[in-house]
Image (spheres, helix red, strand yellow):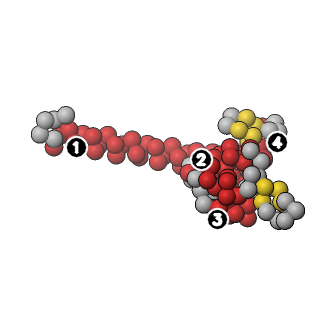
Amino acid sequence: MRIGELSRRIGVPTRLLRYYEEQRLLDPDRTGNGYRSYPESAVARVRQLRGLLDSGLTTEMIRAILPYLCGPGHLVPSPDTVPAETVARLQEHVDRIQARIDCLARNRDRLTAYLAAVRPDNG
């Protein structure tokens, strides 16, 4: 499929897809006339990229782990081949995500208590 179709199917601008290509996160084929040609698997790949980016990973970190991810929960090649530095960076990121989750949960609980106190019906 061409870049415009992929863009419509995923709901991201073509410029963002070109950026992913610049960052070596996507590698489309080129047709004889130079147009980008994406396989059907690019839909899942872009969704995966969006999820990783939304979790706060940088494109550099994604590029480091992308060769090992062929889908959620699947590692290729063996986990033993993932560099220790990559593992450490990912653990740091997981720890930062958990700290944000903890902070959000505390704030949610405080706001819920505040709303319960200020609502006339206490509900």
Q: Earlier in the sequence, mark 2 or mark 3?
A: 3
Q: Are marks 2 and 3 in contact (CB under 8 Å)?
A: no
Q: CA distance from mark 2 to mark 1?
A: 33 Å
Q: Which mark is residue 51?
A: 2
Please tell me whether mark 2 sits on a helix, a strand or a loop. Answer: helix
Q: Amino acid at mark 1?
A: Tyr
Q: Are marks 1 and 4 in contact (CB under 8 Å)?
A: no
Q: Which residue is mark 3?
A: 15
- Residue 83: give x, y in percent of width and height: 78, 47
Q: Earlier in the sequence, mark 1 or mark 3?
A: 3
| Closer mark to the observer between disc 2 and disc 1 | 2
| Closer mark to the observer between disc 2 and disc 4 | 2
- Label 2 CA crowd tier, 10 Å (few <14, some 14–19, many 20+): few
Which of 62/105 is in front?
A: 62
Q: CA distance from mark 4 to mark 3?
A: 34 Å
Q: Which residue is mark 4?
A: 81
- Residue 19: give x, y in percent of width and height: 68, 64
Please tell me whether mark 1 sits on a helix, a strand or a loop. Answer: helix
Q: Earlier in the sequence, mark 4 or mark 3?
A: 3
Q: Earlier in the sequence, mark 1 or mark 4?
A: 4
Q: Amino acid at mark 2?
A: Gly
Task: Say which quarter of the image contains residue 94.
Answer: top right
Q: Which residue is mark 1?
A: 114
Q: CA distance from mark 1 to mark 3?
A: 44 Å
Q: Is residue 77 left or right of residue 90?
A: right
Q: CA distance from mark 2 to mark 3?
A: 18 Å
Q: Earlier in the sequence, mark 2 or mark 1?
A: 2
Which of 66/22 is in front?
A: 22
Q: Earlier in the sequence, mark 2 or mark 4?
A: 2
Q: Are marks 2 and 1 in contact (CB under 8 Å)?
A: no
